[in-house]
Image (spheres, helix red, strand yellow):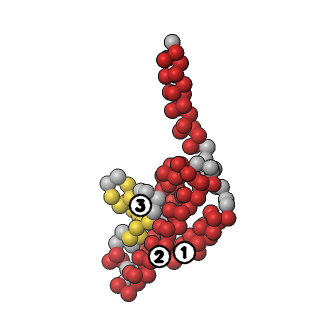
Amino acid sequence: MKKLIVFSMLMAGLMIAPLVNAAADLEINTPAISTIKNSMQARHGQLAGFYASGAVGFTRDGLVAVRDANAVPLAQRQSLNSLVAAENNDRNALYKEIASGNGHPEWESEVRSTFAQRWIQKAQGGWYYQDGGGWVKK
């Protein structure tokens, strides 16, 4: 009987864990998160044209990647690579800060996954994103 009670408690804990993650405040705003969001917002104008041309797309892990370097003139490719690197640094920092701001740094991967889905949902028509089979045009 004691083993059954312990097992039941363990199973209840496993079932509650996803519910706790679902309760994360993804809109939490700390000074660090605000700084990161401002940086990303300022950069978005520079990236928008690259999203529209298909040069850049959203990855399934919540980052951005150069999808088609040939869509960008050679003279602009280094600048594009720098923009993508800066964007990904901010995105990684954002996921980490949101998880930490919720008091659960171990939730970072769940925050990342949720945002990856959000970025794709909010993408404009014609922008690219990765799914299980490669790049897809929205």
Q: Mark 2 points at which residue?
A: 83
Label 2 is placed on what type of residue? Answer: Leu
- The earlier-in-sequence mark between 2 and 1 is 1
Q: Residue at x 51, y 59 (%)?
A: 119
The reply to whether the C-beta atoms of the residues labelled 2 and 1 are less than 8 Å apart is: yes
Any part of residue 103 in sight: yes
Dot 3 or dot 1: first in sequence order is 1
In contact (CB < 8 Å): disc 2 and disc 3: no
Q: Which of 55 and 33 is in front in this view?
A: 33
For mark 2, give the secondary structure: helix
Callout 3 amino acid: Thr
Q: Quadrant of residue 63?
A: bottom left
Q: Please name the residue that numbered disc 3 is placed on.
A: 59
- Where residue 113 sits in the image (x, y, percent)? 48, 52
Q: Callout 3: helix, strand or loop?
A: loop
Q: Up-down: is 111 above or below 138?
A: above
Helix, strand or loop under label 1: helix
Q: Distance between the residues labelled 2 and 3?
A: 15 Å
What separation in Å lies between label 3 and label 1 (alpha carbons)? Answer: 18 Å
